[in-house]
Image: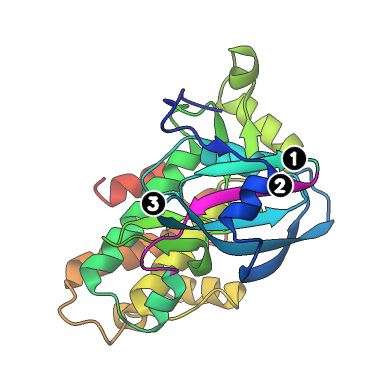
């Protein structure tokens, strides 16, 4: 599952009794949702319940369900500072669960909509999410596979105390494996061929589109993904930069704001092939 981790870094394996203890007998329900039961293209949905719990002295979130957690575990196994950390897991026949930290500042969505973020904090979050997606897409073959998140939205980002973003919500993610990671040989063309077979034509440009929406939502302070087709049309119209800046923010650097908006417009192009890679976006952000 990627680079070798030290024993201290490795997620802990729990049995159902351990998960029961962490969650206090599954007492505090945070949310319930319907998610794909597996990543094989099936339309079957299962209920996923997220509980609040305690591990050691820290509050955690525990996702519990009975579906296939394999891709989610693979995606979270190699730590990254801008991706939620997998603290532990349970894969018993009776319960599948993932244990992750409960970040101090909570979900990004509320912070964006209530206008509590300053401009520098918003830029830090945008840059961190770009690095997270670039890591998952693995253009430099560090992981040996690519992770397509396929759920890049405000509600799937958590924010640490120092405003470091943590990409979460891997419920719909898919893993793309290249021939190189399987047999030791291969090329980018091999990766594309396998991705079409395994992911039914789904590509990393869907995450780029989601990132473009996210940038505009963070800069404007509004939720925009409810009507993506309309948003892409607005992007094509190249509306004035003021249209995309939250009026509640003071002292926004005009040139930096303009670069952010222009970058997001590249991500929202209707032709997926015209959208930049996450690696290119990381470069545009000066990272």
The residue at which mark 3 appears reads as 130
The residue at which mark 1 appears reads as 92
Where does the magenta region start and end?
Answer: 94-107
Sequence-first tag of 1 and 3: 1
Q: Which residue is found at the position 64% from the left and 18% from the top?
A: 182
Which is in the foreground here, disc 1 or disc 3? 1
The quadrant holding residue 147 is: top right
Secondary structure found at label 3: helix
Estimate the spatial distance between the alpha carbons at disc 1 and disc 3, rounded to whole Å.
34 Å
Q: Does 159 appear above or below 191? A: below
Contact flag, marks 1 and 2 (Cβ < 8 Å): yes
Residue 173 in view in this figure: no
Residue 119 in view in this figure: yes
Sequence-first tag of 2 and 3: 2
The residue at which mark 2 appears reads as 96
- Front in this rendered view, residue 90 or 197: 90
Q: Is residue 66 left or right of residue 211?
A: right
């Amino acid at each position: 599952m990627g680079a070798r981790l030290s024993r201290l870094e490795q997620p802990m394996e729990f049995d159902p009794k351990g998960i029961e203890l962490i969650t206090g007998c599954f007492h505090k329900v945070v949310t319930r949702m319907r998610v794909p039961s597996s990543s094989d293209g099936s339309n079957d949905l299962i209920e996923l319940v997220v509980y609040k719990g305690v591990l050691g002295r820290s509050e955690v979130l525990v996702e519990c369900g009975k579906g296939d957690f394999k891709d989610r575990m693979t995606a979270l196994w190699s730590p990254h500072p801008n991706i939620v950390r997998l603290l532990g897991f349970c894969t018993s026949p009776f319960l599948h669960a993932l244990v992750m930290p409960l970040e101090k500042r909570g979900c990004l969505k509320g912070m964006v909509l209530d206008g509590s973020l300053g401009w520098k904090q918003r830029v830090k979050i945008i840059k961190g999410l770009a690095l997270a997606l670039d890591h998952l897409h693995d253009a430099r073959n560090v992981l040996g596979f690519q992770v397509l998140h396929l759920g890049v939205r405000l509600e799937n980002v958590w924010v640490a105390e120092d405003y470091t973003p943590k990409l979460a919500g891997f419920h719909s993610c898919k893993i793309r494996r290249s021939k190189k990671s399987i047999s030791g040989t291969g090329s980018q063309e091999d990766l594309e061929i396998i991705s079409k077979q395994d992911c039914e034509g789904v590509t990393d440009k869907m995450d780029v589109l989601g990132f473009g929406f996210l940038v505009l939502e963070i800069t404007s302070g509004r939720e925009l993904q409810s009507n993506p087709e309309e948003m892409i049309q607005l992007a094509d119209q190249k509306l004035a930069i003021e249209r995309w800046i939250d009026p509640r923010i003071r002292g926004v650097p005009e040139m930096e704001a303009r670069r952010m908006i222009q970058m997001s417009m590249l991500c929202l192009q209707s032709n997926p092939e015209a959208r930049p890679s996450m690696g290119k976006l990381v470069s545009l952000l000066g990272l």
